[in-house]
Image (cartoon, helix red, strand yellow):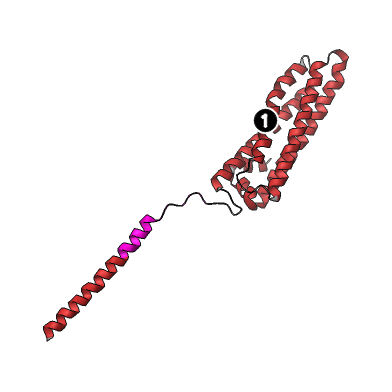
């Protein structure tokens, strides 16, 4: 009788051990089968990495445009011989940069209906229009000669000032969104080194 009880006890212990091993194996298998997560989405939708890349492109384009327009304003103020041709050469790149900025802003890889995104889109469009007006002024200067070039050069200077103000508006919207750190746009700007550098201007 004692032998039967001993055998039964051993059998029970073996069953418990097998059950525990099976459970551990199932947990390990389940963990191994779980897929690796992709880049975490932002709180307002959109892939975080993609948004930060977009923000960096916007800030880089804005900073470059500001530098280029400042160069035209300085050249217009300096005057000199053949200034029209010089400004025309400089503007060719500026016009393209303004269009690129507006296109990049509009291509936000997240919900573009947020207040931050709408404000940025509006200021980028205004910058593009101001830069286009600057281009018209540069063309007028290029077509002018003699004493007629003086008012045309003054018009370029005024248009460059307006364009700088518009670029400043875009920078201001970026800085506002970055400072708030809210929504997809704010989060992306706050995470981009290029935008943080722009914030420190």
Image quadrant where residue 108 sits: top right
Magenta-colored span: 24-42
Q: Is residue 74 magenta?
A: no
Q: Position of residue 168 (x, y in %)?
A: 74, 38
Give left or right: position of 125 versus 107. Answer: right
Q: Residue furthest top?
A: 146
Give left or right: position of 65 versus 49. Answer: right
Image quadrant where residue 201 sits: top right
Q: Is residue 33 magenta?
A: yes
168 w.r.t. 185: above or below = above
Q: Quadrant of the N terminus?
A: bottom left
Q: Residue at x 77, y 14 (%)?
A: 82
181 w.r.t. 160: above or below = below
10 Å crowding of disc 1: few (<14), some (14-19), many (20+): some
Residue on which the image places disc 1: 97
**Front residue of this view, candidates 58 and 11:** 11
**Front residue of this view, candidates 104 and 196:** 104
Q: Residue at x 22, y 75 (%)?
A: 13
Q: Is residue 99 visible?
A: yes
Q: Position of residue 180 (x, y in %)?
A: 67, 52
Q: Residue at x 64, y 52 (%)?
A: 183
Q: Position of residue 2 (x, y in %)?
A: 12, 85
Q: Secondary structure at mark 1?
A: helix
33 w.r.t. 93: above or below = below
Q: Position of residue 71 (x, y in %)?
A: 72, 26
Q: How many marks?
A: 1
Q: Residue at x 46, y 52 (%)?
A: 37
């Amino acid at each position: 009788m004692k032998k039967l009880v001993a055998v039964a006890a051993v059998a029970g212990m073996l069953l418990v051990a097998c059950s525990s091993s099976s459970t551990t194996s199932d947990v390990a298998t389940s963990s191994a089968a779980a897929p690796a997560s992709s880049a975490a989405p932002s709180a307002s939708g959109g892939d975080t990495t993609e948004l930060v890349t977009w923000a960096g492109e916007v800030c880089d384009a804005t900073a470059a445009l500001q530098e280029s327009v400042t160069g035209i304003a300085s050249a217009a103020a300096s005057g000199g011989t053949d200034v029209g041709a010089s400004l025309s050469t400089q503007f060719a790149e500026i016009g393209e940069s303004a269009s690129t900025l507006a296109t990049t802003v509009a291509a936000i890889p997240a919900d573009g209906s947020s207040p931050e995104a709408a404000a940025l889109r509006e200021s980028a469009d205004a910058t593009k229009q101001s830069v286009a007006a600057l281009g018209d002024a540069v063309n007028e200067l290029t077509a002018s000669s003699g004493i007629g070039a003086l008012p045309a050069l003054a018009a370029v200077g005024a248009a460059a000032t307006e364009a700088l103000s518009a670029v400043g508006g875009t920078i201001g919207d970026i800085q506002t969104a970055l400072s708030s750190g809210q929504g997809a746009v704010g989060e992306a700007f706050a995470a981009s080194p290029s935008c943080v550098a722009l914030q420190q201007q």
